[in-house]
Image (spheres, rainbow, N blue to C red):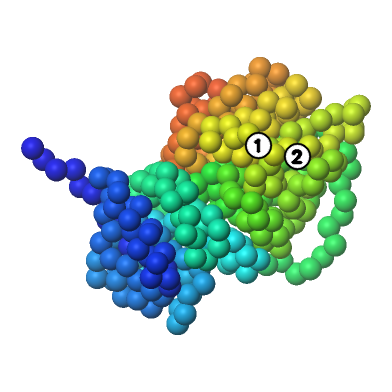
Amino acid sequence: MELTKRIRVLVVDDSALMRKRISDIINSDEECEVVATARNGEEAVRSVSVIKPDVITLDIEMPRMDGVAALKYIMSEWPTPIVIVTAFSEYNGEETIKCLEYGAVDLVMKPSGVISLDINKINNELLTKVKAVSNVNPKILRPILMERLPFQKKREGVTANKLIAIASSTGGPRALAEVLPRLGPDIGAGIVVIQHMPEGFTYSMAERLNWESKITVKEAEDGEPIKQGKALIAPGGFHLTVESHGRGSEVVKLQKGPKEHGVCPSADVTMKSVAPIYGKNGLGVILTGMGNDGVDGLKAIKQFGGRTIAQDKSTSIVYGMPKSAFDAGIVDKVIPLPDIADEISRWAKS
């Protein structure tokens, strides 16, 4: 009987306790095995060069060489699927988003700080993500390197009669970094973004995308009006819905859980609220990610006369959400990632 090849994982963390506990989680699954551990970026780089793991779990703050520097080097020499496993802080939030743009494919947050004695709370999430990214094509792990634009005051847009709802998960921050910065400030639509990400990190992602974009990008606030040329990102841990208080007075509303499809925010929750308000002036976009969040939302948008787009398989880090939408027969166009911004702009101007 032929044995199934196990997913070979390198665990990188400067805490010996965290290395042990994360390794125990990974080794508890018969499909995975930890083949090496490293306590800093330098050790990680040396290990990757020798053992060529299938997946790396990588902390951010480490001595000698931190996670960002190690990731840049690894991606330049031996592109490998990397899942960031870190605690939230303002510094880690910014550095994690850099890692996700430089080629890391997903993020798992330690539940209670740098040394999380309750690390077992993330068992299922960590194992699911390690297994999901293990087959990612290394050729599409190239960095999405965007330039920070010179500071300029972005003009406040007028009321948006059209709305674009974008959903993404695994690989999403990199995909969003290729889509949003390519949209012009004159785009005649408002934008809401649902990225599956823990609390805190969505603020850092919005800040970084705003630096790189001609449109305004920010983490959404409860009751904030929808305007042309402004992208509002659902905060981690909150569902985002759209409410109308009369034509031209649409706002976003935020609400804590419960989770849908195991995630909060959920694209289905958002898109179902968008569909009846915007009708034929609504556009649903599904980017890379695990699972099937967004399928019911796209169905609603279609039912009310709106249009739908999904990222194609060849450019998706994980072809889960786009595939689910395509298989459901509710996608009007399947488009490679580099062409999605142009398609969105054409729709907004039509």
Closer to the observer: label 2 or label 1? 1
Q: On the rendered structure, is 218 left or right of 58?
A: right
Amino acid type of the residue that numbered disc 2 sits on in the rendered structure: Leu
Say which of 39 and 78 sits in front: 39
Report the residue at 47% width, 80% height from top.
63
Q: From mark 2 to mark 1, how far is it between C-alphas? A: 10 Å
Residue 52, percent from left and from top: 27, 63
Q: Which residue is mark 2?
A: 254
Question: Which image quadrant is residue 18 in?
Answer: bottom left
Determine the residue located farthest toward the front in the rendered image. Answer: 117
Mark 1 secondary-structure assignment: loop
Q: Which residue is mark 1?
A: 257
Crowding near the residue tagged with mark 1, few <14, some 14–19, many ≥20 C-alpha atoms within 10 Å: some
Q: Is residue 245 above or below residue 146?
A: above
Report the residue at 79% width, 38% height from top.
252
Say which of 7 and 179 sits in front: 7
Q: On the rendered structure, is 206 left or right of 334?
A: right
Report the residue at 55% width, 58% height from top.
112
Mark 2 secondary-structure assignment: strand
The answer to whether one can see residue 319 in this image is yes
Tell me the quarter of the image containing the C terminus: top right
Report the residue at 46% width, 32% height from top.
323
Q: On the rendered structure, is 222 left or right of 67?
A: right
Query: How many circles with numbers are drawn on the protein?
Result: 2
Crowding near the residue tagged with mark 2, few <14, some 14–19, many ≥20 C-alpha atoms within 10 Å: some
Q: On the rendered structure, is 134 left or right of 102?
A: left
Tell me the quarter of the image containing the N terminus: top left
Residue 56, percent from left and from top: 37, 60
Residue 59, percent from left and from top: 47, 66
The answer to whether one can see residue 105 in this image is no
